[in-house]
Image (spheres, rainbow, N blue to C red):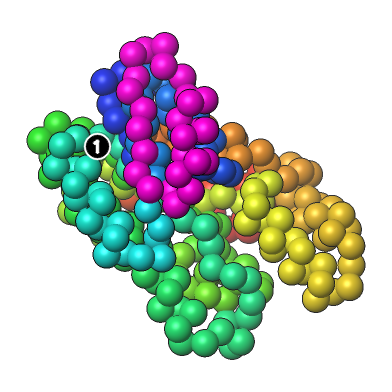
């Protein structure tokens, strides 16, 4: 099985913490050079210094905030003009929790912009280089909500579904060029995002943080909440040559929780 990413460059978004950081670590272990993307430059420097360099990798970063698509586009275009990106991991923190009916129209607009539009901006920038290299992997970190909506995540459910359909469309368009487009759907994973969701549920129900966390774990057939590295393993595999014929799919990494095929 060819899992070698030496000579490949991976752009990983949201890569200073959680699943994004874990994905950057795993991709670097397989030999890829990493371009970290996040808004906190000090955190970016810290993560870049932690990445594996044994295969001669050259790691760098882009300081960008997905709340400002125009600024992201400007910086990514400048980077893309000088560098070929073979692997793009689209990963953005989810919208605030809450029922769909409680959301304001602007909440949907902001989420659509920071998720789908920013993803699309980056894809348009990196795809020409992928085509030229005859190698491309676009991996979108979304949510199991694209299969079964999750209660209390109205805006997220809506926007994640849009990203999944956008991704499937791209997978058909880009397959002839050796570029695959797939989605990884994390279940409960111990990230700052999940911690926020647990706190919100605890406040609404009057339960303790630990009680809500225990209830979440009990919903998973595996009986536990995952570590971000377990999601990252799926991302890293889809980025490799070994996954070249896997295209246009949603991959739940959720311990068996999602109740659909």
90 relative position to 219: left or right = left
Displayed quadrant of residue 154 = bottom right
Judging by the rendered image, the residue that carries numbered circle 1 is: 85
The residue depicted at 89 percent of the width and 67 percent of the height is 207
The residue depicted at 89 percent of the width and 62 percent of the height is 208
Q: Mark 1: which secondary structure?
A: loop
Displayed quadrant of residue 180 = top left
Vertical comparison of 134 with 200: above or below? above
Give the crowd class for mark 1: few <14, some 14-19, many >=20 residues within 10 Å.
many
The residue depicted at 53 percent of the width and 62 percent of the height is 94
Of the pair 195 and 68, the residue shown nearer to us: 68
Vertical comparison of 218 with 67: above or below? above
Of the pair 74 and 121, the residue shown nearer to us: 74
Where are the magenta residues, as a range?
38-63
252 relative position to 226: left or right = left
The residue depicted at 74 percent of the width and 69 percent of the height is 200
Decide if residue 87 is in sight here. yes
Vertical comparison of 230 with 215: above or below? above
Q: Residue 40: where, in percent of width, then height? A: 48, 48
Displayed quadrant of residue 136 = top left
Q: Quadrant of the N terminus?
A: top left
Q: In the displayed image of the protein, which residue is found farthest to the left?
A: 132
Q: Residue 259: where, in percent of width, then height? A: 63, 58
């Amino acid at each position: 099985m060819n899992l070698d990413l030496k000579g490949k460059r991976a752009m990983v978004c949201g890569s200073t913490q959680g699943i994004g950081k874990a994905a950057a670590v795993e991709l670097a272990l397989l030999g890829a050079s990493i371009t970290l993307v996040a808004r906190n430059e000090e955190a970016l420097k810290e993560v870049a210094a932690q990445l594996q360099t044994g295969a001669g990798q050259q790691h760098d970063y882009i300081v960008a905030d997905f709340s400002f698509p125009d600024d992201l586009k400007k910086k990514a275009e400048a980077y893309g003009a000088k560098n070929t990106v073979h692997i793009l991991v689209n990963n953005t923190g989810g919208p605030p929790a809450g029922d769909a009916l409680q959301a304001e129209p602007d909440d949907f607009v902001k989420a659509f912009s920071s998720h789908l539009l920013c993803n699309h901006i980056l894809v348009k920038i990196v795809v020409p280089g992928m085509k030229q290299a005859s190698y491309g992997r676009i991996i979108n970190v979304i949510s199991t909500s694209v299969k079964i909506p999750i209660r209390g995540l109205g805006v997220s459910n809506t926007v994640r579904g849009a990203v999944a359909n956008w991704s499937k469309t791209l997978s058909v368009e880009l397959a002839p060029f050796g570029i695959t487009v797939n989605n990884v759907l994390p279940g409960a994973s111990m990230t700052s995002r999940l911690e926020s969701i647990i706190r919100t549920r605890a406040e609404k129900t009057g339960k303790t943080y630990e009680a809500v966390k225990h209830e979440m774990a009990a919903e998973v057939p595996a009986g536990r909440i995952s570590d971000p590295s377990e999601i990252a393993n799926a991302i890293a595999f889809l980025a490799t040559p070994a996954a070249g014929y896997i295209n246009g799919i949603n991959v739940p990494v959720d311990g068996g929780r999602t109740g659909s095929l």
